Each structure stands twice: as structure tokens, then as C-alpha cells.
């Protein structure tokens, strides 16, 4: 039977380390590191994620603030709020929460977001730093996925991995993080002709395509470790809604050796990394002041 792992224990350890780092930062800053959460409107998913962040922030000794704009706001209005937070010296990290108003894309916000406060690695500068193997602030979900894999397998060097999904926020930075750890990586995407063949080479399979149940038994090599990054809200036949991953859990049971839980695998670690990045951003901003 396949073992299902979650990220809560690793997240607690990361939060405890972040609290220690925050205490050191507070001695220099004279205040706790602060994360600003930018929401346009009051969408339930954004509110729920903000509540999770606030809960974890208490454990990490990080202050949070919520800045809210109109749900039907314009690009100019949202960009004005970002610029205000860029200039606010009491704010160390900024996280724009989706959904955005109609006509506003993440690239529009990343283009003006301060790279020093970009705690989810959204800006072109931080993406370039990661690709070049330099220090920066890197996306939280890929960092979480790699740490969860390391929790299961230890040193990843020399393993074969396949990443299914090539988004700028998850798939591509995940590729870079794995390369830095000495992993041989195949990346699959919408134009991959034989997804099964691409996945079957993997000791370690990351599913990050954003399509519920995409990965089935034939994609998974026997004994592989599967990290499911997909978060898909699916309406069931009875009208209820359920969060499903990109992996068909029932199908891969008994084939994969280990699979991460959804949403409690990568999810808790993603939030923990967000707070760790906020403290790191505070430390770097103070050092450069």
C-alpha cells in the first residue's frame, strides 16, 4: 500500500526556525518582520488563505497586515496599492492574493513589485537570480515541494525526476531548485507528446499541471515517490465541492511507494516558506540599509 505523507511536521520545524530567526531580526529592526497581504475584494479563497497565513505567522513571530482594494478595481488602482506597500518601510514582504480584478494579470503586478519584498519569488529579478544560481527570494510552493521530497528521500542527488507542469510560478522554478540539488530533471508540459513515457523514467514525480486526476497508475513507475502539488476545486455529482490533486490517488495506490497528501502535503510547507521568506527579506533589507 502506498504511504501518504503530509507536510505538517516539517512545517512546524520550519516555523520554529523562522521564529528564532525573527527574534534575531527584531533585535536589529526594533520590531517584528511584517508581511502585507494584498487582496482585491473579499473572495472566500483569498480570505481562507489569509487566515491560514495569519495562524502560521503567530508561530513564526511575524506580523501580518491585510490591505484590501475593490474587487472590480482597475489595474492602475491595484498597482497604486503595490507601490504604496513598496514604499512603506514597516513592510518587509508583500504577497498579492488572487483572484485579481478582471483584466489584471500577475505579470502586471510582478513588474512593479519590489524585488526586495517579493516573498513569493514573482518578480523577473528573483526569477533570474534563481535561474542563475544566485541568492534571491524564491517561490514558496516549489521550495515546499523540494523539502517534502527531501523529508521522504533524504539527499536527492543523482535521482531522476519528472516535473509535470511548466508554469512560471511552480514548474520552472521547481526545475531550477532540483538542478541545484544534483537531480536529473525531465519537465513535461502541454505539448509533451508522450506524458506516460516522460513520467515512467522518474524516481521522483512532481505533479503540478493544475488538472485533477491527470496522473494515473500508468504514469507512475513502481516504487516511485510522488509529490502532488495540484489544488483543484472539483464539483462532485451530488453538487458538493472537493479539493483534489493532479494525481488519481486511488489509481496509484499500491504503485507509488509514497505520495503527498492534498492539500496537507505541500500546502502547510508553502505557507511556512512564505513566512521564512518574509524574515529573510527583513534581514536583507536591514543589512542593506
Image (cartoon, rainbow, N blue to C red):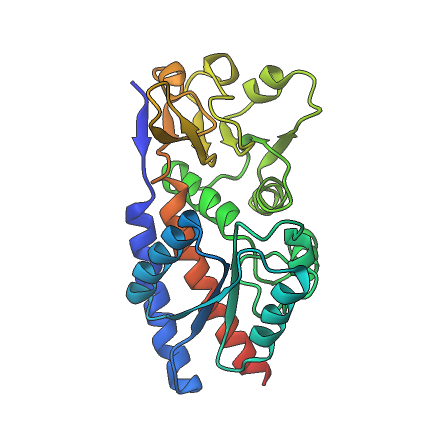
Image coordinates for residue 257, horizontal then vertical, percent: 37, 23
Question: Image quadrant of residue 82?
Answer: bottom right
Of residues 98 and 31, which is closer to you in this image?
98
Residue 172 seen in this snapshot? yes
* In this rendering, position of residue 217 left or right of residue 86: left
Look at 44% across and 16% down and name the residue there. Answer: 222
Look at 34% across and 52% down and name the residue there. Answer: 11
Above or below residue 238? Residue 165 is below
Of residues 162 and 188, which is closer to you in this image?
188
Question: Image quadrant of residue 160?
Answer: top right
Image coordinates for residue 172, horizontal then vertical, percent: 64, 42
Above or below residue 64? Residue 223 is above
Of residues 252 and 157, which is closer to you in this image?
252
Image coordinates for residue 79, horizontal then vertical, percent: 64, 66
Look at 32% across and 22% down and name the residue there. Answer: 2
Of residues 169 and 88, which is closer to you in this image?
88
Question: Image quadrant of residue 77?
Answer: bottom right
Q: How many marks?
A: 0
Residue 133 seen in this snapshot? no
Amino acid at each position: 500500500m502506498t504511504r501518504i505523507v503530509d507536510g505538517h511536521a516539517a512545517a512546524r520545524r520550519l516555523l520554529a526556525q523562522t521564529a528564532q530567526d525573527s527574534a534575531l531580526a527584531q533585535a536589529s529592526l526594533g520590531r517584528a518582520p511584517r508581511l502585507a497581504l494584498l487582496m482585491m475584494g473579499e473572495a472566500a479563497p483569498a480570505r481562507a488563505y489569509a487566515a491560514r497565513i495569519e495562524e502560521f505567522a503567530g508561530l513564526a513571530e511575524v506580523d501580518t497586515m491585510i490591505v484590501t482594494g475593490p474587487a472590480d478595481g482597475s489595474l492602475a488602482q491595484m498597482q497604486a496599492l503595490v507601490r504604496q506597500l513598496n514604499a512603506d518601510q514597516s513592510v518587509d514582504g508583500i504577497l498579492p492574493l488572487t483572484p485579481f480584478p478582471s483584466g489584471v494579470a500577475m505579470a502586471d503586478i510582478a513588474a512593479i513589485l519590489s524585488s526586495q519584498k517579493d516573498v513569493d519569488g514573482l518578480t523577473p529579478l528573483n526569477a533570474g537570480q534563481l535561474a542563475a544560481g544566485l541568492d534571491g527570494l524564491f517561490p514558496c510552493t516549489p521550495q515546499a515541494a523540494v523539502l517534502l521530497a527531501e523529508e521522504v528521500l533524504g539527499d536527492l542527488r543523482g535521482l531522476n525526476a519528472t516535473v509535470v507542469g511548466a508554469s512560471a510560478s511552480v514548474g520552472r522554478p521547481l526545475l531550477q531548485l532540483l538542478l541545484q540539488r544534483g537531480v536529473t530533471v525531465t519537465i513535461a508540459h502541454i505539448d509533451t507528446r508522450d506524458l506516460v513515457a516522460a513520467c515512467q523514467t522518474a524516481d521522483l514525480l512532481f505533479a503540478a499541471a493544475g488538472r485533477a486526476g491527470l496522473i494515473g497508475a500508468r504514469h507512475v513507475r513502481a516504487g516511485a515517490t510522488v509529490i502532488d502539488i495540484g489544488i483543484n476545486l472539483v464539483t462532485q455529482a451530488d453538487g458538493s465541492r472537493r479539493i483534489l490533486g493532479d494525481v488519481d490517488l486511488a489509481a496509484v495506490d499500491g504503485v507509488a511507494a509514497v505520495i503527498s497528501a492534498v492539500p496537507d502535503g505541500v500546502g502547510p510547507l508553502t505557507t511556512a516558506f512564505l513566512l521564512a521568506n518574509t524574515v529573510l527579506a527583513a534581514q536583507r533589507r536591514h543589512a542593506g540599509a
